[in-house]
Amino acid sequence: MRGQEFPKLDCQYAGKCSGCPWYELPYSEQQQRKIKALEPYTVDAFHPVAPYGLRERMDISLFEGKLGLYDFAKKDLVDIQECQQVVPELNHWIHDFRKQLPPVRLGSFRLRIGINGQRGIWMDIPNVDIKKLLEEKTYLMSMMNEGVHIELGQKRKALLLKGEELKLQDDIFYPWFSTYQGEDFQPLPLFSKVGDFSQSGQQANKIMMQVLSKMLFDLPVQNISELCSGIGNFSFFMASLGYEVDAHEWNLASLKACEKTLETFSEKAKIKFHRTNIHANNLEFTKKWQHTDLVLADPPRSGLGKFVDLFANYEAPKYFIYASCFAETFKKDLEALKRFGYKLKRLDLVDQFPQSKHVEAIGLLLQD
Ligand SMILES: C[S@@+](CC[C@H](N)C(=O)[O-])C[C@H]1O[C@@H](n2cnc3c(N)ncnc32)[C@H](O)[C@@H]1O
């Protein structure tokens, strides 16, 4: 496969900031390395998206007045004013956030730009600092007055103003990301919290949906069981194409967010969300497999793990689509799935992580 060329990354932090470890490699070389990392599997199509500017969310750290990403030794923060990997609106948000950093010694922050340009932040800071900021009020109020939606702490509680009081509340969802619906790929806003997992940007996500719809197109499939469905990115898209989808996810907040998106979705009857830990040997879960034509899995980096062993208990579905951003576990799981007769029939790579070794792999497996 011939590698595509893009201009090289021209960033003042290149070589210092660990966010773009492959900044020195021409894009064609990055592409070849990503394809090689999937060996012994053969890549059928590599989909470049853009060399930078794709991310609509960014995780950034603060330590003693420095705001940025870690250096290559993972010891010091590289203080960054902007990041080439993010969309321009997010760089404006980073810029404004820097103007008035929170009065805390350390913290991690997820900054997001929503589908309508709104700004969000999840501030993962120690509880003592949350308490201090809530008592002090002015810092948080000034961000809220600028229209920023704030989530605080490990539980990602939303900050609300009730009268004169700042209150924390569970589960406030906004459309921070969007998936697509129908054969003409109309955007469908997806509700979530700022801190929830979403794919990193809509441009690459659309290509992933195109890859998925091509894979599904010719298959004699009606019922799909989806594992690790998150905020419903694939689930709503597949249901909009007419498939009956059982979506399984463990994160409660993501499931509640899906219920919120469901309220706006015209094909409600096509989709059911279940709270399932895919690693638990759960009888109800196993029963669902009896009438599944295809499994779609998009697990976290740790992969499918013990889940694959469940296939020993019943007849496994004929088709399996596996999406992963982590080549090592993708290959390990494919190897485990071989025990149940699955063979890789097609492999697409969508490069939503340029300048790094990561890539989104989407594989279609068929049982012999
Ligand atoms: C890579 S994300 C996939 C999200 C979704 N496909 C998307 O495109 O936004 C992985 C998801 O797996 C979920 N997850 C992690 N461990 C799980 C488990 N043991 N059982 C079920 N879901 C799990 C996470 O909460 C997360 O939503």
Image (cartoon, helix red, strand yellow):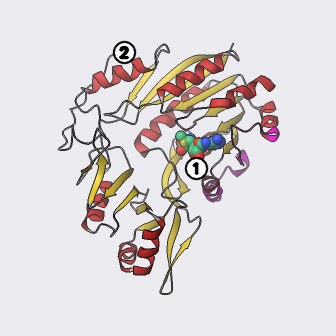
> Which image quarter holds the C terminus?
top right
Amino acid bearing label 1: Ile
> Which image quarter holds the N terminus?
top left
Percent position of residue 133, x then y: 41, 74
Percent position of residue 30, x then y: 31, 25
Q: Secondary structure at mark 2?
A: loop
- Residue 364 makes an appearance in the image: no
Lateral position of residue 285 relative to residue 142, left or right: right
Q: Earlier in the sequence, mark 2 or mark 1?
A: 2
- In magenta, the rendered stretch is 256-284
Seen at 44% across and 67% down, the residue is 149
Amino acid bearing label 2: Met
Vertical position of residue 160 compared to residue 93: above or below: below
Q: Is residue 270 magenta?
A: yes
Vertical position of residue 192 compared to residue 157: above or below: above
Percent position of residue 66, x then y: 26, 57
- Name which quarter of the figure residue 105 lies in: bottom left
Q: Which residue is mark 1?
A: 231
